[in-house]
Image: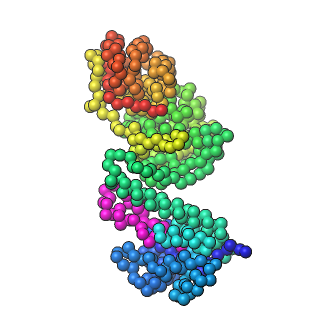
Amino acid sequence: MSDLVPVRNALISVSDKMGLTDLAAGLRAAGVTIYSTGGTRSHLEKSGIEVEDVADYTGFPEMLDGRVKTLHPRIFAGILARRDRPDHLETISEHDIEPFDLVVVNLYPFAATASRAGVSREECIEQIDIGGPSLVRAAAKNQNDVAVATNPEQYGEIIEQLQTNGGTTGALRRQLAAEAFDHTATYDRAIAEYLQDETVSGEFPQTMHVNLRRKTQLRYGENPHQRAALYSDRTDRSANLVSARQISGKELSYNNLLDLDAALEIARGFARPAASVIKHNNPCGAATGDTLLEAAEKALAGDPLSAFGSVIGINRTVDVATAELLCEPGLFIEAIVAPDFEASAVGLLTTRPRWKDNVRLMQVGRLDESGNKVTRRFISGGMLVQDADCLSSSSLQWKTATETPVDDELWDDISFGWEMVRHVKSNAIVLAKDTSLIGVGAGQMSRVDSVEIAIDKAGERSEGSILASDAFFPFPDSIEAAAKAGVAAIIQPGGSRRDNEVIAACDEFEIPMVFTGRRHFKH
């Protein structure tokens, strides 16, 4: 027995009109009668598509500024009646009710409205859809007999099945029903979280839902034997890798995405033209400059050996001069993320270097919007949630702890180093000079090991550099190593029981040290 269901009557009431005209035209070409309401009906009639008015069908007018349109027994009985139940069919026939075989509904844009700057509470409340979720749930419940579409991306397959099979298959209806319940669940979660934010001031909510949708299946994860996929957070409005446009290059890998995200976050943190070079999720180079070309030159010079096979983050449109630099022989770049790329720069990057066919160019758009304000990390049995470490640093809150004062010309490097150290895995030490990263010690179990690694990376360039530490120095041994390398100033949170010993060591070597009072651990 075939599970194919012909579509004779369709109910359409949508907020998002994308693809609506093509859908309706396809339905009419298949002989489907369309019932519709308000703005949807007007939109279709203006497109020359014949539509039955729901108000005429129910004999009941829309009222309360559109709050009541489809909430009527003639609508819901037509959706919920089971076609395999003679008593159901007899009942709707007795009351002259048409059975609906397709329901096309998407909901008021509550989440988009609530995320708008300056939106009022009243505006948000008016975007709470009542009839829409009810229609969707009714159709999804009766999936044996009714198809339900909640997303314009579903329209093509529905029309294709009508043209090919003369109706919808059971497999498609079950798939659409699952997506429909996910759609209403996501919608209700957005409303609940908005109302929770009003009532739970300064605390994390009692319940937290992760609203993600699979965007693509990746080739593999960190290693070839691990499966992987990329999911999008539909509530995130910031410039990000998931919503970025890939201009060229091979498919992005799991590791590419992690590194590009790190590169973007560093570049996003600077107002001046900036570039960051990421290798294995840590910066091996970063810099700011008066021009993007200057910033990129300094960033690549930070650790040229490690920069081979890296990804690059940039906070300005990639221009021809910067593209020329990135095309120089001896460089190999996996991917570049930037707000935009000049057309000529794209031409250079995709035709000149030997890696021309492979480089991934990711356009994320303007970086005005900041990244996530909350970070989430899954652990066995649950999830850790915290405020993101994104508070801007202010030198007004800093304190020079040593008797040795800070030379005025060092403050730009001190500020740059303190911004950079938040992006390096703990124990984190960075050396900076001329607002560029010249040495990094990351992820070591001992802070003095990180200091020595950063100094070794910097080499002779450490003379006159500044040193930034993500947390306090427990002993003065790191200060002694910094002094031998010619470090000119140190910035760190302070707060150790041995702060006095560390300060005394700095004064002994005439190295000024600044306390920030804020730690930048990144585990």
Where residue 395 sits: x, y (%)? 29, 31
Quarter of the image for residue 497 reads: top left
Segment tinted magenta in the rendering: 103-132
In the image: residue 420, left or right of residue 245:
left
Q: Residue furthest top?
A: 508
Where residue 211 sits: x, y (%)? 49, 53
Q: How is the image coloured?
A: rainbow
Where residue 521 sits: x, y (%)? 43, 31
The question of residue 106 being in magenta is answered with yes
Q: Residue furthest front?
A: 87
Number of marks drawn? 0
Closer to us: 335 or 389? 389
In the image: residue 372, left or right of residue 175:
left
The residue at the point 30 percent across, 60 percent down is 120
Closer to us: 66 or 431? 66
Q: Is residue 185 above or below residue 439?
A: below
Quarter of the image for residue 393 reads: top left
In the image: residue 216, left or right of residue 313:
right
The residue at the point 38 percent across, 56 percent down is 194
